């Protein structure tokens, strides 16, 4: 269910993000890419997202480039039992400009609060996926 990129696209669009799939690739796999346009801190932003690694069903790695900021999002799945799976999400940001460094520095200052919110959102999404999986099973 994590590789259902169509649901991610629809979810982003519902949140006001303009998402455009780049290229003609239809099946999920390495090289799949998107351009996303959104408002952040009152300014229009654009991000290019690429599915850099896809090892179904264990791992997905996305690489993002956006106005002086590079990001790597890794999603790992570890089967604990036939009905339990551990979901791990790692996000790394690398600033390439002074304004991006200031943004990352402000995120570091708020790391505790942001970490807590990030973990809660990932846990909420995992519960949503689990409920959706139970409905289709």
Image (tube, grey):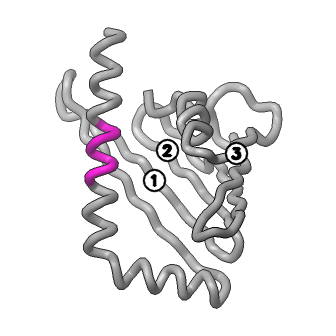
On the image, the x and y values in percent for residue 49 come to: 66, 52
**Depicted 131 relative to depicted 58: above or below:** above
Mark 3 or 2: the one toward you = 3
Distance from the alpha carbon under mark 2 to that under mark 1: 6 Å
Q: What element does badge 1 sit on?
A: strand
Distance from the alpha carbon under mark 3 to that under mark 2: 22 Å
Query: Residue 18's mark?
Result: 3
Residue on which the image places disc 2: 60
Q: What crowding class fits label 2: few (fewer than 14 Cα within 10 Å), some (14-19), or many (20 or more)?
A: many
On the image, the x and y values in percent for residue 121 come to: 33, 49
**Residue at image coords 63%, 86%:** 99
Is label 2 in contact with label 1 (beta carbons under 8 Å)?
yes
Q: Which residues are magenta?
A: 120-126
Residue 97 image-quadrant placement: bottom right
On the image, the x and y values in percent for residue 47 come to: 68, 59
Residue on which the image places disc 1: 74
Q: Residue furthest top?
A: 137
**Residue at image coords 25%, 41%:** 86
Distance from the alpha carbon under mark 1 to that under mark 3: 23 Å
């Amino acid at each position: 269910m994590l590789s259902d990129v169509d649901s991610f696209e629809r979810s982003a669009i519902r949140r006001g993000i303009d998402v455009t799939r780049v290229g003609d690739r239809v099946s999920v796999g390495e090289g799949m890419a998107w351009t996303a346009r959104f408002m952040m801190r009152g300014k229009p932003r654009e991000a290019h997202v690429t599915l850099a690694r896809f090892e179904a069903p264990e791992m997905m790695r996305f690489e993002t480039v956006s106005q002086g900021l590079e990001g790597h999002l890794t999603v790992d799945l570890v089967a604990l039992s036939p009905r339990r799976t551990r979901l791990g999400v790692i996000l790394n940001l690398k600033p390439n400009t002074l304004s991006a460094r200031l943004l990352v520095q402000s995120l570091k200052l708020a790391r505790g609060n942001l970490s807590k919110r990030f973990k809660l959102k990932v846990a909420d999404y995992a519960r949503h996926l689990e409920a959706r999986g139970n409905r289709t099973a």
